[in-house]
Image: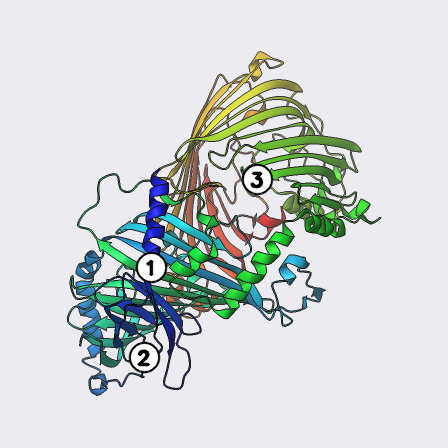
Amino acid sequence: MRNYTLIAFLFFTISNFAQIKGTITDNKGNPLPFVSVFEENTYAGTTSNEQGKYQLNVKEVGKNKIIFQYLGFKTQKITVASGEKTVNLDVKLQEESFDLNEVVIDPKNNPANAIIRSTIANKKENSDKTGRYTADFYSKGMFKVKDLPKKILGQKVDLGPDMASNLDSTGTGILYLSETISKVTFQKPDKLKEKIIASKISGNNRGYSYNTAALSTYDFYDNTLDFDVRMISPIADNAFSYYKYKLESTFYDDNNQQINKIKVIPRRDKEPVFEGYIYIVDDSFAIYAIDLDIKGYRMKNEFTEVMNLKQSFSFNAKNKIWSKNAQTLSFSAGFFGIKFLGNFNYVYSNYEFHDAFEKKTFGNELVAFELNANKKDDAFWNEIRPIPLTIEEQNDYTKKDSLQTIRKSRKYTDSIDAKNNKFKVWDIFMGYDYKNTFKKYSFEFNGLLNISSLSFNTVQGFNLDSGFSFRKWNEEKGQETSISTTFNYGFSDERFRVIGEFRHRFNNINYATIWGSGGTKIAQFNNSEPITKFVNSISSLFFKDNYMKLYNLEFAEINYGQDIANGINLTGKIGYEQRKPLFNTTDYSFFKKDDLYSSNNPLAPNDFVTPAFDQHHLFKALVTTRINFGNKYISRPDGRYNFRNDKYPTIYLAFEKTFAASEKRYEFERIGASVLYDLSLGNKGVLGNNFRAGKFFNAENISFIDYRHFNGNQTHIGTSSRYLNVFNLMSYYSNSTNKSYFELHSEYNDTGFIMNKIPLLNLLKSTLNVGFHALTIPDRKPYSEFTVGLDNLGFGKFKLFRVDYVHSYQSGIQQNGVVFGLKILNVLD
């Protein structure tokens, strides 16, 4: 009933709007985009679009004083006296005649520095004035591609019919366009609740826009702003360590308040800093406007060329508050000759400032959608939309919305599927996909020559995978079902192995999922699989080092998991396993043909006869719990989407038990726990931590397979983006235990804080990593590692490499080595 009341209230409010609209130009008739338009001493406001057109909804038209505010132009205040529901008002803004008398810079007494110091001194007071509020929020986001080439690296670009229809003959067009209307409740520094009233995505009448206030709040009164890295505000407490300033001009606004235009100049190019202009109100030292650029390499995003952030603030003489009324975030990015452009506009209006909120105002739910928020018709949007659509945007909505009906029809989807589903003879070898879009299911055959699965190990020799998979989905209910089989054949051991898997997700609310698998496969003794197939193949074939140790596993298991409370996920597994030892069957390699591989026994690498364990079977049960403290989430009609709260750690708890084994000695219990936590150090980087501990019970004579194995690395190749789960110089099975254990991984990444300040090295645009890793187990001296290295290395926009120097120590034995990180291998495997 509450929802119906709110909707009725909204429509009543809309119907009582009066609207002032028109076009804003300069003296020469050129349209002015993103001009702030608001009613004096109210919080009713909007901005003009890229073509200079605006529309402002006011409660009633009588003697309204409308203010037009644009950087570089004189602010205009126009009184509108009319009783009409709609008033057309075109405005021509005059360029500002700046007062340059105060711009004479005395090197010993820079006036800009004095203004910035006063702004820093007064920022808490100014920030607190807008510390608690409710407001109406509108956002519009557009993402487009420009001049898409016909070929990339000599290969023809195949867009498919849907994507191709979005682009014109030059390869330019809108890929994504959406709008959002919401009601926001906010309390600094980070408490937010947002109710989405309306959401619209071009060409998708089921879409729920991600253009939310929760993802677009940038406050320059804070010391840092989050753009993947912590960018330093030009008025941060330590701003003078990062910026120089120049007072370029002063002018007066419509309230005769002096505004200082200050140029923000980075002291060092490679640091996480802005550049551009900040406008400060004299006397109060509040922010009047922001016009700042962010270069991609400064926020460690090489694909982004430049991002521009504009903010404008309006003054309310009744409460003496400067509040943000408009924000524009635009960017350009590209790679391989492809150019991407983005533009996101935000309007804040109808502020209500509060001294305090009720205790239960804020919770873990960040964003919620009204029922049928994505079903509002064009009449609703045309009435309430504060920024008029451009012609390009109007055409995009018209074209995509009309095409949507066609594209969702069975006739259309069947015709597209028929084209893509055509079977060719070579598909037997290369693979084949079949899809029925209308009935929402697909089938895939990996092909008899699935080259991407080709790998080598000394047990199977070269081996190859193939298989089938079937998938069916229901987007509205959040359900998905998949069934697959994988066939593996080893050419040296001449063994054919098959496994089957199924998975069913019941919904997108608590993500209840059941899955199971069974069959025969080869498995590493360490089920975390610390050495990848690709790295092992290279290590074996080129250097004759077979670090991967394998056994034959015949198994059947079933799992079930779901979120049982906010931030708490519980998963249970029960399964049967029969384990058989395996031996090397090949001595093949590309080089070092006279050398011998080690045996497949991780306990005795020079013993080619004795197996690492006796054949046996057992049943195993495992229960794991993941706890994300302070978990936040977005509620949508089609699901719930969780966001881990970075302020708190994530905890994993596990209990494992084996039973009904072929011999009693294989039965045991184990408890385990781990804590993962990233400690943010602001602009100084992040300290990542991973603590693990566990203990076995009744495990004196269990199989070596069931020992706790730790992720070592003898290949000197790193495959992960962070080393918080690996010992970089430790052999794979030298410290395995069936007793108790504690391991610690800690890694500091400076995100450029140190490296950006070192001449020459700062040209690499890299980040510094310093790590410490330790392991303690009974009856053995502790193992420890110290690491130091550089990350974010590469060529041009592709920063895929990392290099670390590692020093390890255990029982008086010291090792030194270099680990080369190839993060792309994490994708290949």
Give the quadrant of residue 118: bottom left
Can you give x and y, in whole percent of width and height, for residue 99 in the image?
A: 22, 85
**Structural crowding at the residue carrying mark 3, measured as other residues with C-alpha within 10 Å and reported as few (<14), some (14–19) or many (≥20):** some
Q: Residue 72 carries which label?
A: 2
**Residue at (29%, 70%) from the top-left corner?**
289
Residue 557 higher or lower than 529, as above or below: above
Apparent side of residue 237 relative to residue 578 in the rendered image (left or right): left
Residue mark closest to the camera, 3 vs 1: 1
**Type of amino acid under label 2:** Gly
Instruction: Give the residue displayed 68% in from the left and 47% down from the top.
Output: 410
Residue shown at the point (35%, 72%) measured from the top left: 35
Secondary structure of residue under mark 3: loop
Above/below status of 721 relative to 631: below
Tag 3 residue: 530
Mark 1 sits on what residue?
218
Q: Distance between the residues labelled 2 and 1?
A: 23 Å
**Which corner quadrant of the image does residue 13 belong to?**
bottom left
Residue 400, percent across and down? 58, 59
Query: Would residue 330 be visible to someone looking at this image?
Result: yes
Q: Is mark 1 on a helix, strand or loop?
A: loop
Earlier-in-chain disc, 2 versus 1: 2
Which of marks 2 and 3 precedes in the sequence?
Answer: 2
Residue 155, picture quadrant: bottom right
Dot 2 crowding, Cα within 10 Å, few <14, some 14–19, many 20+: some
Residue type indicated by callout 1? Tyr
Q: Is residue 444 left or right of residue 789?
A: right
Measuring from the top left, give residue 175's x and y in whole percent: 55, 61
Q: Which residue is drawn at 73% across and 40% down?
A: 465
Which quadrant of the figure contains the N terminus?
top left
